[in-house]
Image (spheres, grey):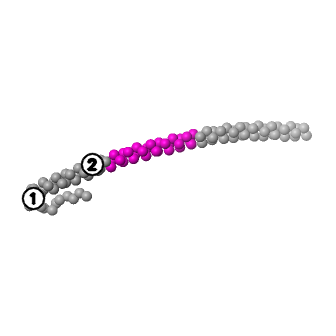
Amino acid sequence: MSNRGEDLESQVAELQAAVDGLTEELVETKERVRQLEETTDSLEADDGEAESRTTAEQQAQARGAERRDAEFVAERDDDADEAAAEGEEEESDDDDGDDIIVA
């Protein structure tokens, strides 16, 4: 019977070593997960700042595009007024109906 007792004690020691090893791995895994969560939170915060900078840059570009568009329309209107004035002076009978209409 002592042989049976020794076998049981051996199994208990092995199981205890396995539990200790698994516990250590679990603690290390939890620590690593915590570090990854902190890194992820940090990156998300950085992305949020980058997005706000990008949005500001996009807004500035849009304002610049709006100014350029307004200047283009104003120039086009001025050119159209000049062309109309010249057209009135040079009225010709060449109206063949192939005028291009730009909206």
Q: Position of residue 21 (x, y in %)?
A: 73, 37
Q: Identify the mark at residue 91; answer none if there is no mark.
A: 1
**In this picture, is 63 found above or below 3?**
below
Determine the residue positioned at 53% across, 43% down: 44
**In this picture, is 5 found above or below 69?**
above
Between residues 88 and 3, which one lies in front from this camera angle? 88
Q: Identify the mark at residue 36; answer none if there is no mark.
A: none
Q: Position of residue 38 (x, y in %)?
A: 59, 40
Between residues 19 and 78, which one lies in front from this camera angle? 78
N-term mark: 2 or 1: 2
Determine the residue positioned at 22% across, 53% down: 77
Determine the residue positioned at 60% across, 42% down: 37
The image quadrant where one finds the N terminus is top right
In terms of secondary structure, where does tag 1 sit? loop
Which stretch is magenta? 39-66
**In this picture, is 50 found above or below 74?**
above
